């Protein structure tokens, strides 16, 4: 069966709305009252392929992700997961509940990014509470020049890690993080 680009786009948008609402509910937030997902005309979400220089779309991440994967859209200068369809912007980090990048995960993406994060760590490129994944994160991988900082408090406060690029075992903050910041 041949699927046209238009049909794939419509299916992707529907999947994004359903996936986005499930992620919002899993993070303990209420769903938006709008009946349609916003469409800002952005490019598909992409992450760097670990074994190659070619990008991977979020649909490929979703196809290989463990059951129960959550998605959180973050936007510069704000705190909290935002209501954007999965499939726009760039993936900035993946937080896993198992060591060595295993188990359930939260895929964090910025729907407005086309080139990734800045090189400095003094800017605010988003963040959120971890909701259903609070006190469960054990390993972290970032993408597109982004870094993540984990906090044991729900409002980016309390004990924290340094800025993480890749960490397969979190040490003293293992299974203690309640919120995160992206830079």
Image (spheres, helix red, strand yellow):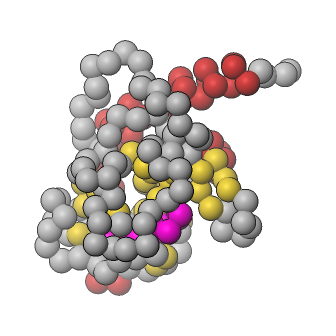
Is 64 situated left or right of 168 in this image? right
Q: Is residue 36 visible?
A: yes
The tally of labels here is 0
> For the view shown, which residue lies furthest in the right direction?
1
Let me know if residue 121 is in the magenta part. Answer: no
> For the view shown, which residue lies furthest in the top direction?
35
Q: Where 114 sits versus 123, above or below?
A: above
Residue 50: give x, y in percent of width and height.
66, 68
Residue 34: give x, y in percent of width and height.
32, 18
Residue 71: give x, y in percent of width and height.
43, 46
Instruction: Write down the region rendered in magenta.
Output: 139-149
Is 61 situated left or right of 70 in this image? right
Please give the name of the residue rendered at 25% of the width and 41% of the height, measured from the top-left corner. 28
For the C terminus, the quadrant is bottom left
Is 56 situated left or right of 148 in this image? right
Q: Nearer the viewer, residue 134 or 88?
A: 88
Please give the name of the residue rendered at 32% of the width and 40% of the height, measured from the top-left corner. 82
Q: Is residue 175 visible?
A: no
Residue 31: give x, y in percent of width and height.
29, 28
Q: Quadrant of residue 95?
A: bottom left
Please give the name of the residue rendered at 46% of the width and 75% of the height, measured from the top-left corner. 165
Please give the name of the residue rendered at 46% of the width and 30% of the height, measured from the top-left corner. 40
Q: Quadrant of residue 147?
A: bottom left
Q: Where 104 sits versus 43, above or below?
A: below
For the N terminus, the quadrant is top right
Is 86 situated left or right of 78 in this image? right
Let me know if residue 145 is in the magenta part. Answer: yes
Q: Nearer the viewer, residue 129 or 57?
A: 57
């Amino acid at each position: 069966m041949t699927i046209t680009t238009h049909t794939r786009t419509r299916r992707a948008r529907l999947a994004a709305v359903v996936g986005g609402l499930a992620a919002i509910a899993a993070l303990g937030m209420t769903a938006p009252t709008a009946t349609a997902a916003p469409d800002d005309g952005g490019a598909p979400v992409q992450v760097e392929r670990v074994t190659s220089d070619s990008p991977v779309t979020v649909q490929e991440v979703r196809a290989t992700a463990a059951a129960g994967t959550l998605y959180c859209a973050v936007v510069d200068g704000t705190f909290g997961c935002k209501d954007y369809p999965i499939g726009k912007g760039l993936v900035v980090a993946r937080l896993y509940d198992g060591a060595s990048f295993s188990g359930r995960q939260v895929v964090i993406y910025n729907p407005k990014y086309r080139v990734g994060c800045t090189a400095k760590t003094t800017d605010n490129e988003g963040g959120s509470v971890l909701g259903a994944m609070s006190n469960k994160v054990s390993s972290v991988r970032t993408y597109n020049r982004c870094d993540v900082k984990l906090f044991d408090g729900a409002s980016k406060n309390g004990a924290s890690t340094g800025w993480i690029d890749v960490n397969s075992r979190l040490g003293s903050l293992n299974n203690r993080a309640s919120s995160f910041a992206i830079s």
